[in-house]
Image (tube, grey):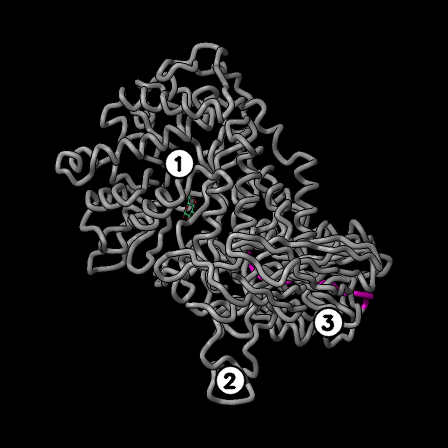
């Protein structure tokens, strides 16, 4: 067993700038033939599938057991040896230098016995070089085009260096703001996550991921990794069958339906069964029920982590873990036989596979199936026809003007206006402005927790963005972010000292308006970044209080990767913009929103709790036997909190305009179980400038065989309306919308009433009902 040498996410890697003239060859179409010339056949996917299966079969027949075991191995850049490659290594992750990728690919294609190309993979989560808003931010746009464009540009930039698989989208529904990885997916709702998952898969893969600017997507982490107990990353999860199927599986299903051909199994266990050794989720559901014919790769050392830990700690990540396997061979056998096809970083299936076969603990049929799946994806990816990349072209595909423009649009569409008392916003660019705060002139943190090969210097700071639109702007940091170095085991110090506050107050007093740029460091969210306290870190609240005391108009702009407990911020700031980590165009997008070039229209994809003790708090909860009523005692409430609501609800977000919904109409009073029903509602821009509203459609099944969520999102549409303009939004529902999974794992559509809510957040709105017959 070898162990992780953190960081391994390509964070230390840069795009190769070498323009070494490599001779490009193109593999011949014949299976196993060394590539010689440009005569490759590139059939369409439909026509190709039969021939792909034949080619896979031909290849499989020629493979030795050792070659099969190498094919199911996935190694990070720093563990790969030339020998692994000559022996037929399957995949490599986190290599982003096209010259090195080509070198290894030449070795694989020319010097391995069967000339099988390597699949190169990378975590292009919210951008490769052009970094987009974090996925939680992109979800706030309620505009799937934002996510699709992000992934499409990420695919183009990734493919340009020779990558052909990305470990994205991350589609883990989560009710856990303490969990740092909530930043990486679309929040707490399965429907929103599903729509965004499909959009991201389409963006990455297009119709055919063999295209030179496309990559195969890998939704992760299968499954229910978003619900670790206590919000502690990697921790265990216990959940019912109906929860699994109603909350956590749908985004994966949507991703697979959109064509995702690879899936990553998760680190955590559900109901005591680790994600990469779970025959029920991996084989029964994903492969058999859903007909997924691609492959499942394990998460990093997740196979090794099946083993038991020794009684004496400490241990390093990857040493051991769940205790469902006695040793490495047992771990390899359990993973493979449960349905895991490819082992990342640890090497148990490869190292012990021969012995396991001899002992009858794994079967050749299952090993062949795993290899077949991997080869199938490689054929579909066109790797046999086009194994190489042109390193001379790689740099020219990065950070192109259209990508940068799209990142700016994505960022401004992702911002959520949380408060705007007395029309503090938009600010007037003709006035004098001071930007204050530790994130005010900060490039590093704008990129968020998965920055691919993005570089700090690519990012536009808040100060620069605001100054560009309002030249009379100054900046005072007030307090600093000291990034821990190395980041692994110490915490970043965010605004730990108030020594600079007096200077900030003086600057505020002499400016007309103030922008406070506050939040988290990027290392405070993301993987292995759970927090028990999700208030604004350090002394940032005191900074707000000091600025408030000046009496000057100010806005708090927040940069963070998770919902924060913002009760005190809300009580003190007249205006609040949730900007998330916006990516390379952070400052320009913030300025667009603050000065009203862009009228904010984002909505929260996740509830913001009042207090950590409320977690998990999410809008689509089931009703309790004694639903919350803070006016009396014997019901589901906290004695020390005068409300059961979050501070900001799912779906909430303001605009510089006001909108009104009216005329909620159902196409019928009833819907047949196999039928459809149309639901429509008018939305009007009643006051203010041209702007966006997100019309949201929720359902509730008031009487069902198992208690149903008080609301479930089943449709949304972001519309842009001129002042005074009105439009009609129509949703069509069918059985998939009104039914649910029960605890036997059956999808049931029950007769009876369905309540409909058309609203502009998960609270309130217009309501009507229909009957399912
Ligand atoms: C993460 C995955 C990621 C993998 C490879 C793991 O630690 O959980 O999301 O894809 O590393 O970088």
Dot 3 beta carbon under 8 Å from ligand 1: no
Tell me the magenta residue range: 510-524
x%, y% of residue 193?
53, 53
The disc, 3 or 1, on the residue closer to the chain's N-terminal end is 1
User: Based on the displayed image, in which of its 4 quarters is residue 50 positioned?
Assistant: top left
Residue at 31% in and 35% down? 370
On the picture, is 37 further left or further right than 376? right
On the picture, is 224 further left or further right than 190? left
Label 3 Cα crowd, 10 Å radius (few <14 / some 14-19 / many 20+): some
Q: Is residue 352 above or below residue 278?
A: above
Work out how far the residue at label 2 is from the one at label 1, CA to CA, in angstroms: 51 Å
522 is within the stretch colored magenta = yes
The disc, 3 or 2, on the residue closer to the chain's N-terminal end is 3
x%, y% of residue 700?
54, 66
Label 2 Cα crowd, 10 Å radius (few <14 / some 14-19 / many 20+): few
- Mark on residue 574? 3
Location of mark 2 (residue)? 640
Location of mark 1 (residue)? 294
């Amino acid at each position: 067993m070898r162990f992780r040498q953190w960081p391994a996410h390509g964070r230390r890697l840069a795009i190769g700038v070498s323009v070494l003239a490599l001779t490009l060859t193109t593999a011949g179409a014949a299976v196993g033939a060394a590539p010689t010339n440009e005569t490759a056949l590139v059939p369409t996917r439909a026509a190709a599938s039969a021939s792909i299966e034949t080619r896979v079969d031909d290849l499989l027949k020629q493979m030795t057991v050792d070659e099969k075991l190498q094919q199911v191995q996935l190694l990070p850049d720093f563990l790969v040896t030339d020998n692994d490659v000559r022996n037929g290594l399957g995949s490599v992750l986190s290599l982003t230098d096209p010259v090195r990728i080509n070198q290894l690919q030449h070795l694989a294609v020319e010097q391995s016995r069967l000339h099988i190309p390597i699949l190169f993979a990378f975590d292009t989560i919210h951008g490769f070089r052009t970094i987009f808003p974090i996925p939680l931010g992109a979800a706030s746009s309620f505009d799937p085009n934002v996510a699709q464009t992000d992934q499409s540009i990420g695919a183009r930039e990734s493919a340009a260096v020779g990558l052909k698989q990305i470990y994205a989208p991350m589609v883990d529904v989560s009710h856990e703001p303490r969990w740092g990885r909530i930043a990486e997916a679309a929040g707490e709702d399965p429907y929103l996550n599903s729509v965004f998952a499909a959009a991201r898969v389409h963006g990455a893969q297009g119709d055919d991921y063999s295209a030179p600017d496309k990559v195969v997507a890998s939704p992760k982490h299968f499954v229910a990794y978003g619900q670790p107990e206590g919000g502690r990353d990697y921790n265990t999860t216990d959940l019912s069958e109906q929860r699994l199927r109603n909350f956590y599986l749908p985004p994966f299903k949507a991703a697979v339906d959109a064509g995702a051909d690879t899936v990553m199994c998760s680190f955590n266990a559900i109901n005591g069964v680790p994600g990469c050794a779970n025959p029920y989720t991996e084989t029964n559901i994903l492969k058999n029920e859903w007909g997924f014919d691609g492959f499942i790769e394990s998460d990093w050392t997740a196979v090794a982590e099946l083993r038991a830990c020794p009684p004496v700690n400490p241990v390093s990540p990857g040493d051991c873990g769940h205790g469902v396997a006695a040793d490495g061979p047992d771990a390899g056998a359990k993973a493979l036989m449960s349905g895991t096809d490819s082992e990342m970083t640890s090497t148990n299936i490869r190292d012990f596979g021969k012995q396991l076969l001899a002992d009858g603990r794994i079967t050749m049929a299952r090993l062949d199936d795993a290899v077949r799946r991997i080869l199938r994806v490689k054929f579909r990816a066109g790797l046999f026809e086009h194994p190489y990349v042109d390193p001379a072209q790689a740099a020219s595909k990065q950070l192109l003007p259209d990508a940068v423009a799209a990142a700016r649009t994505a960022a401004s569409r992702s911002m959520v206006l949380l408060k705007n008392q007395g029309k503090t916003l938009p600010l007037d660019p003709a006035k004098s402005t001071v930007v204050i705060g530790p994130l005010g002139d900060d490039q590093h943190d704008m990129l968020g927790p998965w920055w691919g090969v993005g570089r700090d210097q690519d990012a536009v700071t808040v100060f620069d963005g605001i100054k560009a639109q309002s030249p009379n702007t100054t900046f005072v940091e007030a307090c600093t972010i000291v990034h821990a170095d190395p980041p692994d085991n110490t915490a970043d110090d965010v605004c730990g000292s108030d020594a600079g506050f007096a200077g900030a107050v003086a600057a505020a007093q002499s400016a007309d308006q103030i922008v406070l740029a506050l939040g988290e460091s990027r290392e405070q969210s993301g993987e292995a970044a759970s927090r028990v306290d999700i208030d604004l870190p350090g002394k940032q609240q005191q900074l707000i209080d000091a600025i408030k005391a000046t009496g000057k108009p100010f806005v708090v702009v927040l940069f963070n990767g998770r919902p924060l407990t913002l009760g005190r911020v809300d009580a003190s700031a007249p205006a609040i913009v949730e900007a998330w980590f916006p990516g390379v165009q952070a400052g320009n997008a913030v300025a667009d929103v603050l000065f009203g070039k862009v009228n904010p229209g984002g909505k929260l994809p996740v509830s913001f709790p009042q207090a950590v003790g409320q977690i998990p708090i999410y809008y689509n909860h089931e009703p309790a036997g004694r639903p919350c009523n803070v006016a009396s005692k014997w019901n589901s409430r906290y004695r020390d909190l005068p409300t059961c609501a979050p501070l900001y609800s799912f779906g909430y977000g303001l605009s510089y305009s006001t909108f009104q919904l009216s005329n909620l109409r159902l196409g019928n009073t009833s819907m047949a179980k196999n039928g459809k029903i149309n639901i429509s509602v008018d939305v009007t821009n009643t006051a203010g400038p041209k702007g966006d509203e997100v019309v949201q459609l929720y359902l509730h099944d008031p009487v069902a065989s198992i208690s149903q969520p008080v609301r479930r999102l089943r449709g949304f549409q972001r519309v842009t309306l001129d002042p005074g303009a009105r439009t009609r939004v129509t949703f069509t529902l069918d059985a998939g919308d009104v039914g649910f999974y029960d605890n036997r794992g059956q999808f049931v559509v029950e007769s009876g009433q369905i309540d409909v809510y058309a609203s502009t957040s998960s609270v309130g709105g217009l309501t009507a009902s229909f009957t399912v017959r």
